[in-house]
Image (tube, helix red, strand yellow):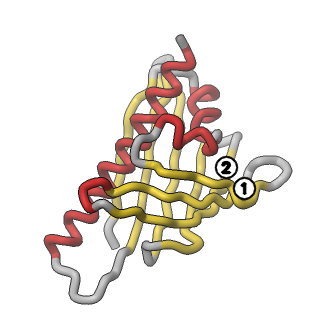
Amino acid sequence: MPKIELSLVIDAPIEAVFAVARNVEKFPQFMDDLKSLTVLERNDDDTRTVTEWVGLLREFKMTIKWTQEDRWSTEQFRDDFTLIKGDMDKMDGFWQFTSEAGGTRFDSFLDYEYDVPLIGAMVKSLIKKKLTENLQATMTAIKGESERLQK
């Protein structure tokens, strides 16, 4: 199964970055390729959410939809997520936030499976490229919002 690993450094304290990452309802306000995000469930201590996402693939004039469960650890500054249902066959991963040199290192790992019968290697590599670009855009948007709020 394909895996994507990305990281970047954010010029903001870990608590501020983690707060932006957890405030998923605001994602559509600063993420261009996210059409909507709806919180379907949230437990009382805000450590578990179930969210429904609708992303845009502008090049193909299509949307991709999925529902995921997130497990947020405020002690470890980490989000572990897994696909409940959606256009992918499998999607698991995590976001890990670590204090680093006055800022925050944001590591993201995604393991996914998207099986379409008779899909060629070129199309599979294009899907991986688009998922990588979308994950990078999500991380960059969280970075931008976190740094903007620090000014």
- Amino acid under disc 2: Trp
Q: Is residue 128 left or right of residue 83?
A: left
In the rendered image, which residue does mark 1 sit on? 48
Q: Residue at x 59, y 50 (%)?
A: 79
Q: Regarding mark 1 in the picture, which secondary structure is present there? A: strand
Q: Residue at x 55, y 15 (%)?
A: 150
Give the residue at the far front of this rendering.
Answer: 61
Position of residue 58 relative to residue 121, above or below, is above
Question: Dot 2: few (<14), some (14–19), or many (≥20) neighbours within 10 Å?
Answer: many
Q: Quadrant of residue 137?
A: top left
Question: Dot 1: few (<14), some (14–19), or many (≥20) neighbours within 10 Å?
Answer: some
Position of residue 53 relative to residue 25, above or below, is below
Give the residue at the far bottom of this rendering.
Answer: 117
Q: Regarding mark 2 in the picture, which secondary structure is present there? A: strand
- Mark before the other along the chain sequence, 2 or 1: 1
Q: Nearer the viewer, residue 19 or 148?
A: 148
Whether tag 2 and tag 1 are in contact, CB under 8 A, the answer is yes
Q: Nearer the viewer, residue 10 or 120?
A: 120
- Amino acid under disc 1: Arg
For the N terminus, which image quadrant? bottom left
Q: Residue at x 63, y 58 (%)?
A: 51
Q: Position of residue 45 (x, y in %)?
A: 82, 47
Q: Is residue 8 left or right of residue 127?
A: right
In the rendered image, which residue does mark 2 sit on? 72
Q: Position of residue 54 (x, y in %)?
A: 49, 58
Q: CA distance from mark 2 to mark 1?
A: 6 Å
Give the residue at the far top of this rendering.
Answer: 151
